[in-house]
Amino acid sequence: MLRDKPPGTFVVRDSNSFPGAFGLALKVATPPPGVAPGDGTELVRHFLIEPSPKGVKLKGCNNEPVFGSLSALVYQHSITPLALPTKLLLPEYDPATTPEHVSATQALLEQGAACNVAYIGSVDCESLTGSECVRRAVAITVEDAQRNVTRPVSVHFKVSSQGVTLTDNTRKVFFRRHFPVNSVIFAGMDPADRRFDNYCVIGYHDACMKTARL
């Protein structure tokens, strides 16, 4: 499935031979030294991503750091190849989606989509990424809100191809904040499936949801 793809295209799968590890198949531009050009299979290199107590790393690559999550490893290698033959080429859309769905999503991003949401707060998650980052951020922000350390507010949330823009509807916490699209590396729901009481949100009114998932 990678032979006809551009260099940098990759697939990550659970490893059948090493439980808890992942197999990385990567399309490269040139075959390894000593390997003659053939039908294209020689341009697909295979690597093992092994787990460690602190995260995951490429097996057999001493100059590779340990990453806190698989998504962090993939993202960093999309910026610089490190020990890989080439940078990872992140897909522009989920390969599992249909072309019609992709076209509709692209059109929506070009136009922009917006709604009002409750802004609870922001948290420094240090080196955490992915769902564990969301879990930590939710736990801290909800606790701070319950202790009145922070006051949640109603904000206008807009997402477009340029990134995410938050505008404080109450002007009590900030005016406007913009996050460029290349600074957003993960978005997701709370893994613990917690709910938040919107009654304590500044700007709440009867038309708002009383409780919402985080």
Image (cartoon, rainbow, N blue to C red):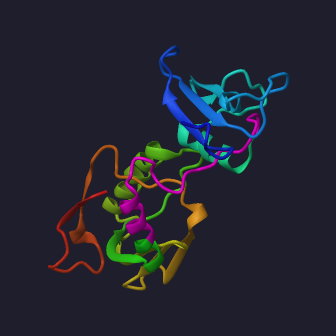
Residue 96 versus residue 166 in the image, above or below:
above
Taking the spot 69% from the left edge, 44% from the top edge, the residue there is 7
Residue 66 versus residue 199 in the image, above or below:
above
**Magenta extent:** 82-106
Residue 50 versus residue 26 in the image, above or below:
above
Q: Residue furthest top?
A: 17
Taking the spot 77% from the left edge, 29% from the top edge, the residue there is 37
Which of the pair 159/209 is nearer the observer?
A: 159
Which of the pair 34/135 is nearer the observer?
A: 34
Q: Quadrant of the rendered structure where residue 77 is?
A: top right
Which of the pair 184/9 is nearer the observer?
A: 9
Which of the pair 171/186 is nearer the observer?
A: 186
Question: Of helix, strand and loop, which mostly describes the magenta segment?
Answer: loop
Residue 79 versus residue 18 in the image, above or below:
below
Residue 88 visible in the current orientation: yes
Number of marks in the rendered image: 0
Q: Quadrant of the rendered structure where residue 120 is?
A: bottom left
> Residue 211 appears at what percent x and percent y?
20, 63
